[in-house]
Amino acid sequence: MRTTQLTLLACGAAALALSACNNQENPGQSDPVNAVQDATSEAVGSVSAMTAGQTVEGYVMNAAMGDMYEIQAADMALERTENAQVRELAQMIKNDHQAASQRLQSAAQAAGETVPTELDERRQGMLDNLRAASSAEEFDRVYIAQQVAAHEEALALHRGFADSEEHPQLAQHAQMVIEPIEMHHRRAEQLQEGMGQDGGNEG
């Protein structure tokens, strides 16, 4: 039932994204359209995290792509942000997800699972929306909003697999990454609250 509800939510968000795109007078990306696209991605990601943690293959694929997205998004933030607090969070996220990615590769290899080396279309779209941000202030708003959603998705994924008995090494990895992901999520929420609903940029 919960999966069905989340699927309906994702479909509704996708419809909103299509409507927003159709209502734009000029083709190409814009901040409002990108915001709706990210909201759609968040809904789809919630469904994905709920289901992916039920299989070893799904867990490894989504955990690996989550790490890749976080590292690449953090690199963009370190390059574009003018906010010291956003920079600090991005550096922490990059360090922690690089370490998690290395551990995941070892655990996945022991479990006989192949780790993906490229992002899926959804996460690539999130990076594209970051690139399209029209200013440093807008970048911070989009980046932090994505981080709140992405870490909620990651928590659902890892918590859902942490009790798996099929591959203890991968389950242990899931257990290990939950605490730093919770820390990232809390900090991103704090920064989002500080920016306000309209996404201000506080140095």
Image (cartoon, rainbow, N blue to C red):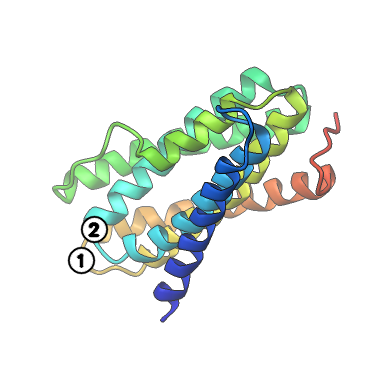
Task: Work out whether residue 100 can be spotted.
Answer: no
Q: Nearer the viewer, residue 3 or 166?
A: 3
Cα separation, mark 1 vs mark 2, equals 8 Å
50 on left or right of 194: left
Task: Work out whether residue 109 can be spotted.
Answer: yes
Q: Residue 94: which disc?
A: none
Q: Earlier in the sequence, mark 1 or mark 2?
A: 2
Is 78 located above or below residue 199 in the figure? Answer: above
Is 122 located above or below residue 55 in the figure? Answer: above
**Residue 178 location, x and y as percent?**
50, 56
In the image, farthest residue toward the top: 79
Instruction: Name the amino acid type tagged 1.
Output: Glu
Residue neighbourhood size for the residue with mark 2, other residues' Cα within 10 Å, grouped as few (<14), some (14–19), many (≥20): some
Asked if disc 1 and disc 2 are in contact, CB closer than 8 Å, the reply is yes
Q: Nearer the viewer, residue 71 or 24?
A: 24
**Residue 33 location, x and y as percent?**
61, 40
Using the rendered view, name the quadrant where residue 29 is placed: top right
Q: Nearer the viewer, residue 57 or 169?
A: 57
Residue at x 84%, y 37% (from the top left corner):
200
Label 2 belongs to which residue? 56
Residue at x 46%, y 74% (from the top left corner):
5
Please, what secondary structure does the residue beneath circle 1 have?
A: loop
**Residue 65 location, x and y as percent?**
37, 41
Label 1 belongs to which residue? 166
